[in-house]
Each structure stands twice: as C-alpha cells, then as structure tokens.
Amino acid sequence: MSAIDWLGREGAAPAIAPPATGSRAILPPREEPPVAIDARAPTVAEGPIGETEPAAAGLLPMSMTGLPRSLWSRSDPERLTRLIAEVDPAVPALSALLNTLMLAEADPPEGSRDFLATRVRRLVEVGALDAASALLDRAGPAERPLFETWFDVALLTGRADDPCKALDENPRLTEKVAPRVFCAARNGDWPRAALAFETGRALGDLTGRDADLLERFLSPEAAEELPSLPPPLSPTPLQFVLYSAVGEPLPTTALPRAYATSHLSGDFGWKAQIEAVERLVRAGAVSENRFLGIYTEQEPAASGGVWDRVAALQDFEAALAAGETAEIEETLRAVWPLMLSNDLAVPFARLFGQELAELDLEGRAGRIAAEAALLSDGYEDAAREIEAEGGVLGFLSAIARGEAPQATPSVPHAQPIAQAFAENAAPPDDLAEMARSGRLGEAILRAMTLFGSGAAGNAGDLTDALATFRALGLEDTARRAALQLAILTEEPLR
C-alpha cells in the first residue's frame, strides 16, 4: 500500500505541495470589486459541522479501504459515469474491487449532481441490493434526486414502507403517478389511490402497462375477467412487483440480476432459490455462506443440471465433515469440475480452500485442493506450504507471494501475468499520470477495463492492468485477479 503518493511513500512529494518556508505569495490575489454592489447581507450557507456530505456517503471508511477521499473528485462526471456503467469485471476479485469503490466514502466529482445515484445504480445492477439500500439510508434518500432510485431498490428488497411513507408526506418527491397510486393503495388509502389512478389516466399521465397493472391491482375482482398481460422484456421494479401482486409472477432467469433477489426467500421454490443465489454469488452480491446455506437446505429430489451440482457439493461437505480421506478425494474430484464450469469455483474455494490446504490429499485431488487453497482468502499462506519448485503450481505459488515466477508454464495468460510481477513492470504512463493528478478512481476503472481486454486475449493489456493495480497499492487485488484468471481458465482440471 506504500507504492503511491497519497499513502505516504517515503521521500515522495504530496499531491498538493505545502508552501515553502517563509513564502508569502501562496495564492494569486483575488479579483474582487472594492465595494459592495448593495447593502443587503450576504447569503451564508448553513450546515452541521463535521457532517458528511450526502453525495460523499459510503459504507466503507477510508481507514478500511485505504482509498483517499479525493478518489473521484477531479474526474469528469460524464466520463466517470460512463466508465462505471460500462466496466465489466472479468474475475471475482475485480467484482469485489468494484463493489468496494462504489461503497467507499469519497467526495463526488466536481459538478456532479447525481453521482451517488450512479454508484447505487451500479450496485443494483450487480444485485447488491442490501448494500445499495444501506448506502441510500446513509445519504438520506427522501430527496427528489434520490427518491426514484430508493423506491426501486425498496420494491426489489420488499421494503417499500419507508419510501411510501416519505411519498405520502411529500408527494413532490416524484412526478410519476404510478408510485403515488401504488403507495396510497399499499398504505390502505384506497379512495385516494383510486382518485390518483383515474386522474392520471384521464390526463394521460398514466398509460400502457403501468395503467393495466394498477387497474388489476386496485380491482382484483374485475381483474379476474380481464385477459392475462404478456410479460414485458424489461419490466420496471414496480411492474415486476405488480405482476406478482396480481397473481402473475415473472420468472427472473432472463431479467437483470437484481430481480433474482426476490427468489432468495424460497417463496418460489427451492430450485428458483438455488438459481438465484448462484447468479448473485458469482457477482459477489451475496456471501458464499448464504450460497452454502441454500445449497444444503434440502436433499435434491431429482437429477441433472442444478441438482447434480447440489448433490455433489452436499456429498463433498459430508465427506469433509466425516474426515475420510478417500471419500474426500472422490467427492472433491466430482464437485470441482461442476463448480468450475458454472463459475462457482471461487465461492467454493472461499468456503473450503483453507480447510483443504491442511489435508494430505493425493494425485488429482491434491492438485485440486492446492488450487482451491490458492483461490481462498488464505492464498498467501497456502503458497508457502505448496511444495513445488516448478510447473503450474510453482508458477501460481510465486504469484500468490507477489514474486516473479522463475519459469512460465504453458497455461493461459501465464506470460503476461509473469511480466506484470517482474521488477521492471510499470503501469502505462497515461494511467500513472491519471492517478497522480487526483483521478485515482478513474485510473482503477480503466485498469479493470484493460484487464478484461487482457483476459480476452490481449496480452499487453493484461500486463498493464496488473502492473497498474500493483503500482496503485492494490497488491491483494492484483494477486487474486492473476490467480483467478490463471486457475479458472486452466483446461486440464475441468
């Protein structure tokens, strides 16, 4: 973490140098008129001292992330918003980094009016609705710029009471009629809901699918005589909730990841619950412990597809609990390919990797255990225990220790990864300058984009991305991302 100026590298000049001793002219003279233009008292802004600006709200303080408060402040707001919307983390380590950036306490870019909403929308997109909701609560969402985002998050998490109460107290929070009708009905004020509905429809402010769904929502008896509505390709959160309320719930498999959270409760069946938690744990939106809890909730009553994964993981966990080495090896060889092929290897490794590192397993099972340990949170300790001077495991253990590998095996991406950990590796000049000029968050996002390009086959971009992470003090991210890319794309263990 000492590799960048804002973390206090010894001998490095700070981003804003202090004035020289004895200097007098530090700032240019202010160009102000010599007299006031009228006798009125000037307007003075008021606010509690020490209170965090809502737009800078975050769940992770600087002491936890190591990121400066000026993370975003000098970037262009439009460019930054576009980068946040477009970045596509190629491995789980970068998904975790993106979530950290979105949750970090940091000043918004100058001139931005809705940067907090941008951060929340990205959290919603990956399915991290609890984090998005907590971030909104921290900022105070009962304001017009944030209300609609707050309302959508609340609908998807089943916590619409607070935004509906806020809307009831201040109808100016939104110009849309549909939320007012929904909240009035939800609060039991059916006459007001019906009046708002009829008025909105008569004025043309409530049309299309919203009007059709709310008509059925307000008049269940009449809805029984109406034909079913075709499912929309891209429903809004309110439409999604209304479909369920009128007895026509929408499947979530083809919808954005955020909608999968509604199936975590198990109300739509265990299979839907399993598929939902798989989608969310891949993006780091739920913990691996919740993933394991849902996977082991019942015994699979069928086979094929998701049931094979569930049965294999349950068999492995039972063998691990029994401590029978032969059974552990057999079940590990069965479950690992299923986890790999369904992008669940990292959650699996975080659950069991460190425990597997303590076992003395033979053959292919031993190799799988070593790689699972290198994908776990204890990857650095596992690297010290791996007895391998060369080959793939030697290469991986060197990366886990942050060292340049002595040899490069013939596995995907090995060469550009090795080059990023060499002593002479350096970030691209433009990204280094970007970080030095106070655009650190933007530099990190661009490095994540470079990593995605490198994972797709552009070796130079991969080296540049990893070298940038290391130069910016994100050593843990660099090592995890390199290990995950090397292990998850290695064909022989599939």
Image (spheres, rainbow, N blue to C red):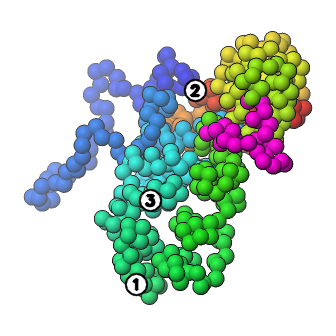
- Mark closest to the chain's N terminus, 2 or 1: 1
Name which residue type carries label 1: Thr
Q: Is residue 88 left or right of residue 302?
A: left
Expressed as whole percent of the image width and height from the top left, the position of residue 65 reads 50, 31
Q: Name the residue under label 2.
A: 473
- Mark closest to the chain's N terminus, 3 or 2: 3
Q: Name the residue under label 3.
A: 160
Please tell me how many numbered marks the rendered image carries. 3
Q: Determine the secondary structure under disc 3.
A: loop
Q: In this view, does 81 lie to the left or right of 339?
A: left
Main secondary structure type of the part rendered in magenta: helix
Mark 2 crowd level (few <14, some 14–19, many ≥20, 10 Å Cα): some
Q: Which residue is drawn at 51% across and 19% down?
A: 9
Name which residue type carries label 2: Gly
Range of residues picked out in magenta: 290-317
Expressed as whole percent of the image width and height from the top left, the position of residue 418 reads 78, 25
Q: In this view, does 92 lie to the left or right of 489?
A: left
Q: Mark 1 points at which residue?
A: 199
> Which quadrant of the structure image shows residue 14?
top left
| Nearer mark to the viewer, of 3 and 2 | 3
| Nearer mark to the viewer, of 3 and 1 | 3
Q: Determine the secondary structure under disc 1.
A: helix
> Does residue 24 lie above or below 260 as drawn?
above
Mark 1 crowd level (few <14, some 14–19, many ≥20, 10 Å Cα): some
